[in-house]
Amino acid sequence: MERADVVVLGLGPAGASAAAEAARRGCRVVALDRKREPGLPVQCAEFVPGMIGVEIERLAHAVRQPIEAMHTYVEGDPPDVQARFPGFMLDRARFDAMLVAEAARRGAHCVFGRRVRRITNAGRVEVSDGSAWDAAVIIGADGPRSVAGGAIGQENKALVETRQITVRLLVSHPATDIYLSSGTPGGYGWLFPKADVANLGAGVSPPFRSRLAGIVARLHRNLHRQGKVGDEVLAMTGGAIPVGGMLQPWGQLGAALVLLAGDAAGLANPVTGAGIAAAVASGRLAGELAAAAVGGASAVGERYGDELASTYGAALDRALRRRRELMTDVRGVSKAALRRSWIAYPEYWAA
């Protein structure tokens, strides 16, 4: 049995940001990740909005290319162009490694290749190597199927399943391309450029998971015929994205306060699936308030929940409404309904 002030589960953007912030404030921090190295395998489309540059120092080291615009294709119609949609395509492995290095520099003990088996009702973190940790605060930043979330009864029930391939990009492209179709139920297709390659993929609701391979293959064939991408698949990945909105992001297990951050807290946008910026910001806040709890502050969980709701609640609620509207009849979705469901269109932002 070992003891820390803060135990962080997961060393993605949320966990690494939390570990860095808590360690910076003087806490003894142990952070555990089941992956063998930061960010690998990549399970992300790797786009972040331009504003994240304000939050992350030295972001340029992980940027593959800037994004200027978004092109949205509805059922194969010519694209609707949102000319001002600034952002960045990241090298997620490098981005994650950068955040982990910052956490380690601040004094967090970051351990890879360790899977958390369970968290007991007393708040003890039991690890696959036989070790166990007690802590004043446990930060669950361990993704949409969070062990920490499950331990406090806060689990992401609504998910989208994704499949993504990496292909050669044959034509320079400064925009993200979005493909909306009733043939991609509960999700959408995408082409996200990364200099000389591109991430090409799709997401669907779990009942339609068996269609994913075909959806992505058809999109790949179409874009190859148009001369936009090569025919060789360079890499393949996939994963789950929470689309049910924000969970209750804190709880208590024995004497341990549990805070959930990033996807574990359901902060991914239920329409776009975007979650990196929210992961970083919520991780930092979790680390800050974990340190406050270690220092004896009271009502930390309530404060954390209130701050997340204030920051993300309205946007997540709108996205969740649009998603539910779209999912009422996935077989008969009209072009108008698809437009209302997507952030590029004024209808999305209407009351």
Image (spheres, rainbow, N blue to C red):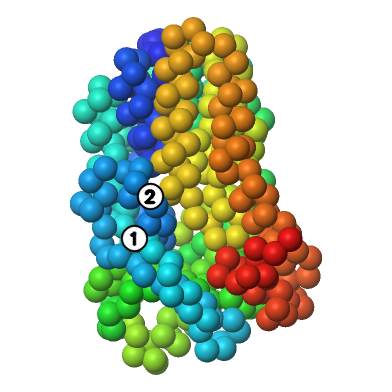
321 displayed left or right of 64: right
Q: Image point 48% across, 44% down: which residue?
A: 278
Residue bearing the label numbered 1: 88
Residue bearing the label numbered 2: 52
In depth, the one of 46 and 341 nearer the eye is 341
Which corner quadrant holds the N terminus? top left
In depth, the one of 257 and 61 nearer the eye is 61
Q: Image point 21% across, 51% down: which residue?
A: 61
Q: Amino acid at mark 1?
A: Phe
Q: Is residue 55 above or below residue 22?
A: below
Q: Position of residue 50 (x, y in %)?
A: 38, 57
Q: Which mark is residue 32?
A: none
285 displayed left or right of 145: left
In depth, the one of 97 and 68 nearer the eye is 68
Toward which corner of the image does residue 36 lie, by quadrant? top left
- Tag 2 secondary structure: helix
